[in-house]
Image: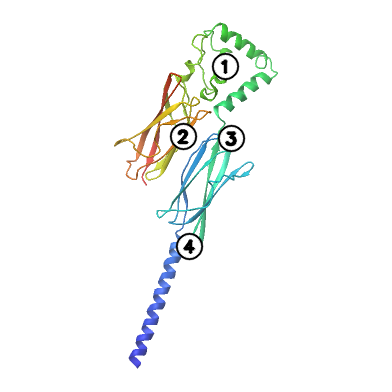
Amino acid sequence: MRSQAHRIVSLGIIGLLLAGGLAVGNGNAAAKVSVKIVSLTTPVTPGTDATLEAQTAPNATCTITVQYASGASQAASLSQKSANAQGAVSWTWRVGANTPPGKYPVTVSCSAGGKEVSAKRSLQVKASAQNQTTSQTTSSTSSGKKGKGQDQPSTETTSTTSSGSKGKGQNQPSNQSTSAATEGQNQPATQTTVPTTDKGQNQPAAAVPAAPAQSTTKGSLAIRIISLTSPVAAGKEATIQVNTASNADCQIVVKYKSGPSKAKGLEPKTADARGQISWTWHVGNRTTPGGWPVSVTCTSGGREGTTEATFEVTAP
């Protein structure tokens, strides 16, 4: 009987030790809960999509808040989500077409094991090329200063239509307004080439500025990279957003060390009525870290253009 009692007591002590070990283990797991924003599409223009990717504890419950000047975004895609078995979670949402330019906080909060953590990043919204051009044109026609106000556009218009070879002085701003008004979003306001009347709109297309990364453009059709997810960790998603001619047919090539990517999401697409187009694809888990070229080629009305930028892949 005494031996059996000792055995029961021993089993009870072992059970208590195991329970205590599990409690400590769970406490340590809870203590290790964290969240990190891996990538965020920024800058982004109103009316286009933004993507945020975060890393946290496996199966953690997460929420996201995008706080604009008018209040928190009510986009349906910004709903609560659960991280996958690897702790990855992401959201893609449309930035409102009337969102004012500026920097807005984006907060991701995740909870697991009774502990909640959060991370914050700034989303930069930039005015589209069309809005920038409209603003510049309004300024030049409403100012009352002599030489810069209403008198200057009159001189610029006469100089541009009568001769495209007069210096750089006042003729240069006129080229910006004329080109942008004709081509819409396709002509950034930073063009400095002064066209003659027989060359028309196609000449500025060879000087498209890079945004947000260094890019090169060639051809008669203007293409502008609005945003590109970079850097991005292997195994995550990348997004590129481009602006070109309305309804232009476009294709994208992402070239890694092993050759062009065959990832789903890199199919040819057609730009919308505003010339906006985007691709989102999965960067392979075994992609070699480094800078890799992304090229976009578009055609419209017999014109063709290609732009290329480099995005950085980091180790997972």
At label 1, the amino acid type is: Thr
In what element is the residue under mark 4? Answer: loop
Q: Which residue is mark 2?
A: 278
Residue located beneath label 3 in the image: 97
The residue lying at 48 percent from left, 44 percent from top is: 52
Q: Is residue 41 left or right of residue 143?
A: left
Image position, residue 256 (x, y; %): 33, 36
Please tell me whether mark 2 sits on a helix, a strand or a loop. strand
Q: Secondary structure at mark 3?
A: loop
Taking the image as shown, residue 315 lies to the left or right of residue 112, namely left
For marks 4 and 1 on the same chain, the one whose residue lies earlier in the sequence: 4
50 and 56: which is toward the camera? 50
Q: Which amino acid does the dot numbered 2 rest on?
A: Ser
> Mark 2 touching mark 4, by CB under 8 A?
no
Instruction: Give me the C-alpha separation between circle 4 and circle 3.
Output: 39 Å
Mark 4 vs mark 1, CA separation in Å:
61 Å
Q: Earlier in the sequence, mark 2 or mark 4?
A: 4
The spot of residue 43 in percent (x, y) is: 51, 36
Q: What residue is disc 1 on?
A: 178
Q: From mark 2 to mark 4, how far is it between C-alphas?
A: 38 Å
Q: Are marks 4 and 3 in contact (CB under 8 Å)?
A: no
Residue depth check, mark 1 versus mark 3: number of the one nearer the observer: 3
Color style of the picture = rainbow
Amino acid at circle 4: Gly
Of labels 1 and 2, earlier in sequence is 1
Q: Which residue is mark 4?
A: 113
